[in-house]
Amino acid sequence: MTIARSRLIHPDISLWYHCITGCVRGAFLLRSGSEQKRKEWLETRLEELSQVFAVSVGSYCILDNHLHLVLGLQPERLARFSDEEILNRWYILYPPKGSNRKKLTDEKLQKRREEDLQDAELMAKLRKRIGSISWFHKLLKEPLVRMINKEEGRRGTFFEGRFKSIAIGDRESLVTTCVYVDLNIVAANMADSPESSEFTSIKARIDHVKSLGRLDDLAAAQEGTVAATTLGKGLNEGLWLAAIEEQSATGSAGGSDSSGLQASAEQTAVVLDIPLGTYVWLVEHSGRLLRDGKASISAELAGIFERLGTSAEVWQERLECLMNNRLLGRFFASTQERLDELAEQVGQSRVMNLAGAPVR
C-alpha cells in the first residue's frame, strides 16, 4: 500500500533520508558511454539544487538505471530564511515570465516580486517547497527528461513516477547508509576502488581534497592520532556536499555563492561528524570486506567501530544485508528501541528494518 509522503518524510521522524530513483522498466537510460553526459548533468544539477534548497546532499551514487541520494532536511535553516530569500531561491528555479512566455523586464519583475511578497499563502507554500525533498527530486529529474525528449523527438517518462524514501533513524545507520551508497559502484564491479568510482560522493570528496593539494593530509588523518586529526581539518572546505566533520561546516565566511544567493556558515550541514580521513578509511575497508569477505581489522578500525557503537562483524553483516537483499522497508535503524520509536511516530504498531538488517 502506498504511504503518503508526509508520513514518511518529516523532521519529527528523521532529518536524513535515503532516496532511490529508478528509470522506467529498469532500463539503462543513464548508462555510461554515449549517455554519460546524463550522469554528468545529474551530478551538476545536484550541486546547483543543494545551493537553492534547504536540503543537503550527504551522499550520492548515479548508476546506469537508478540513483541513490542521502538527503538531509534543514528545518532550522529554512525557518531563518526571510520571505525575500525564499522568493529569490524560487525565482532561480522558476524565473518569472509574462503571458508571452518571455522573462519579465526589470520593472515588471519588481512589480511581480512585490505582489508575491504580499501573498502570505503563496509565500508559505514556497517556503514549504524550498525545504521539501519531494520538490528537490522534481527539480532534479524533470529538466533532464524534457531535455532528453527534445533531443530525441520523443514524449513520455524517463524515471519511475515515485522515488523510494527510507527514514534513517540514528547515527550508526546514517554512517552505514552513506558507506553503502558510496560503495555501490564498487559492489557492481564498475570500479576497482572508491576513489575511481565515477559519479559518486566519495570520489567527489577525494577529488576535492586532491584539488586542495592535501591528499597527504587525508592519508595522515586516517591514523586517528590527535596530530593527524589536526592535519585533517578543513578538508571539506568549499565543497558543496554536506560536510563530514563539524570543523569544516562552520569554518566558511559569509558571501555570495555562484547562484547569487547569500552564503553562510550554515550553507552545508554536517552529515556524520567524524573526520573525513576516518570516513574514507571506513569506505575503503568496507569495500575490501565486501570483495574479500574478510573481517580482520586493525586496532584503529576497531576503535572506529567502537565509537559507532558496533563491531566489525555486525557492521559487515548489516552492510551485506543492504548489498545482497532488496531494500524492502521504509525505516533503517541500528536498535530495536529506535525502530519502536519510529513506529510510534508514524502511528504503526511495528515497522520492519530495511532489508531485514540486524539490530542491537
Image: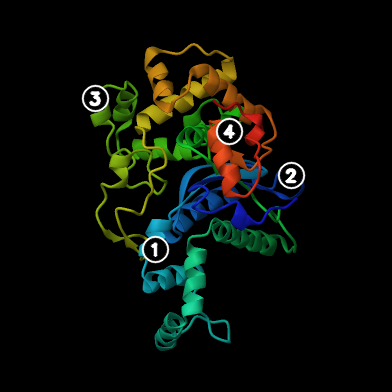
Q: Nearer the viewer, mark 1 or mark 4?
A: 1
Dot label at residue 69: none
Q: CA distance from mark 1 to mark 4?
A: 37 Å
For the image, the number of numbered tags is 4
Instruction: List x then y, in percent, for residue 115.
Output: 45, 85
Q: Name the quadrant containing residue 343.
A: top right
User: Is 208 displayed left or right of 39 in the figure?
Assistant: left
Of mark 2 and mark 1, the one earlier in the sequence is: 2
Q: Nearer the viewer, residue 71 or 358?
A: 358
Dot label at residue 79: 1
Q: Nearer the viewer, residue 349 or 279?
A: 349
Of mark 1 and mark 3, the one earlier in the sequence is: 1
> How many residues crowd around disc 3 within 10 Å: few (fewer than 14), some, or many (20 or more)?
few
Dot label at residue 26: 2
Residue under label 4: 185
Say if residue 188 shows up in the picture.
no
Q: CA distance from mark 2 to mark 4?
A: 17 Å
Of mark 4 and mark 3, the one earlier in the sequence is: 4
Q: Residue at x 54, y 82 (%)?
A: 102
Instruction: List x then y, in percent, for residue 317.
Output: 59, 22
Question: What amino acid does circle 1 point to?
Answer: Ala
Of mark 1 and mark 4, the one earlier in the sequence is: 1
Q: Name the quadrant containing residue 144.
A: bottom right
Q: CA distance from mark 1 to mark 3?
A: 37 Å
Say if residue 122 shows up in the picture.
yes
257 versus 204 height, above or below:
below
Q: Nearer the viewer, mark 1 or mark 3?
A: 1
Q: Nearer the viewer, residue 340 or 75?
A: 340
Of mark 2 and mark 4, the one earlier in the sequence is: 2
Instruction: List x then y, in percent, for residue 27.
Output: 74, 45
145 versus 293 height, above or below:
below
Residue under label 3: 226
